[in-house]
Amino acid sequence: MGQALSSGDGGGGSQHKMMGVFGLAQKGELKMLKCEIKMDPSLLYQTCLYHRQSLLHIAAIYGQIHVLTWLLDQSMKPDVLNRNKQTPLMLAAMHGKISCVEKLLHAGANILMFDSLRGRTCLHYAAYYGHSDCLQAILSSARTSHVALSWGFTRFVNIRDGKGETPLHLAARQRRADCVHILLDNGALVCASTGGYGYAGSTPLHLAARGGSLDCIRELLAWGADRLQRDASGRIPYTVALKHKHGACAALLNPLSAEPLVWPSPLKFISELNPDAKLLLERALLEANREREKSILKGTAYSIESLSQSDSGDDDDTISEASDTEVCCICFDQVCTIEVQDCTHRMCAHCTLALCCHNKPNPTTASINPPVCPFCRSNISHLVVAKLNSEMDDIDNNSPKLRLTRRSWNCHEGSSSFKGLSTLGKMGGRGSGRISLDELIDKPSE
């Protein structure tokens, strides 16, 4: 930021004084800064020569929250612009200074300001540079501010820069998987194209394929990204990945490979999930698609980092009678962690997800019928996390009969004991005594 501190007045003494206050703001020397401005109040509104950065910009860039707070208390406008029409909020989001972002938002900084470089907002900056905490703070502010009412929250999430790129495009291009997930969870359009007025352009999946980010590709596919959508050059994401020599990404994007499971976002009760239940289902979806990826890449030169493996052991068949009440009656393999609130029937996260998932959402369908409980056939309207039976407390903590139950229940802590939904299709074998998911899922009409 050396250029940012070059000053702009002609006189040598004034130039030295300007360099002094900007240096003090950069280093967070608030007491000395107050003394300098008290002697010459005009310094409060001076800017650097080249970038025209104000003291507020400097404090935001370097995360000097105490300096920034004092400057705002001196009635400095939070939306002061530099040479490139960047606000302090944009620069704080660029550098990941979350405390400054939150303070500027609280002070009423305008989140709909566009810079003159690429026509980007603070949301673009947070997504491009991968600062998920700043991204979440800006989105939370947008939900509760006038933007949601006057401009529209979904419209803000999908706001375009000068090249037609949304924040999701930028996050996918820069391999920011956490930001991709946050944006999709807040309504970002997974198949948005950079082309306008009906012309083809790149989708976030094209850009993730070009960057070679497996994590971004997983997120986009899990939210229904179209592997057959073409860009302005007529290429599908698979072709883009091959061109840039990302073999593993190309294998997952190959239209001939198995379709991934897709997060059932159109279903109302999915959007209203409490955080714990949502986390369980998201983990199950991740595990299921990881199993799909392993089968796709099996026998190739590429491999995918697997989730942490569960402890080895032969205790799969040693479930006690006490813990048997907690085992999912659909797959007989996982502990019941999800409960249908109305009828109180329980299933494991994997079977719940399989009941709700639609591999290819139909965008022309105005309403989607909710899935039904496989036990009582009532509509599923709300899901919660199931509580383990109190009788489980009577079992010896070191008993091998309890380890399977614990492994499955700890999925929200990062455990990978699930075998994946890809195994569920094998349940309908003769003499298995298990329910085939084909009998439970209402298949969409073709």
Image (cartoon, rainbow, N blue to C red):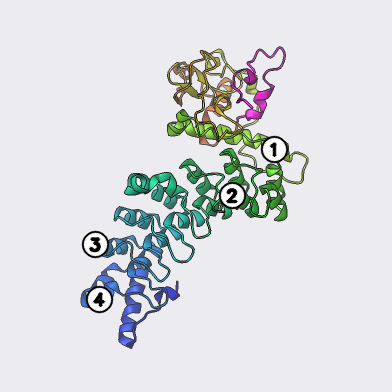
- Camera-near label (4 vs 2) is 2
| Distance of label 3 from label 4 (alpha carbons) | 16 Å
Q: CA distance from mark 2 to mark 3?
A: 43 Å
Residue 94 in the image: above or below residue 408:
below
Indicate left or right for 103 with 303 as reference: left
Q: Which residue is label 1 attached to?
A: 294
**Closer to the observer: label 2 or label 3?**
2
Q: Is 32 a magenta residue? A: no
Earlier residue among tags 3 and 4: 4
- Secondary structure of the residue carrying tag 3 is helix
Residue, disc 2? 203
- Circle 1 — which element? helix
Question: Mark 4 and 1 residues: CB-CB less than 8 Å, in contact?
Answer: no
Task: Tell me the element at label 2.
Answer: loop
Q: CA distance from mark 4 to mark 2?
A: 49 Å
Tell me which amino acid carries mark 3: Asp
Disc 4/disc 1 C-alpha distance (Å): 65 Å
Q: Position of residue 1 (x, y in %)?
A: 45, 71
Question: What residue sits right under mark 3 in the picture?
Answer: 73
Q: Which residues are magenta?
A: 418-446
Q: Is residue 62 visible?
A: no
Q: Does label 4 or label 2 sit earlier along the sequence?
A: 4
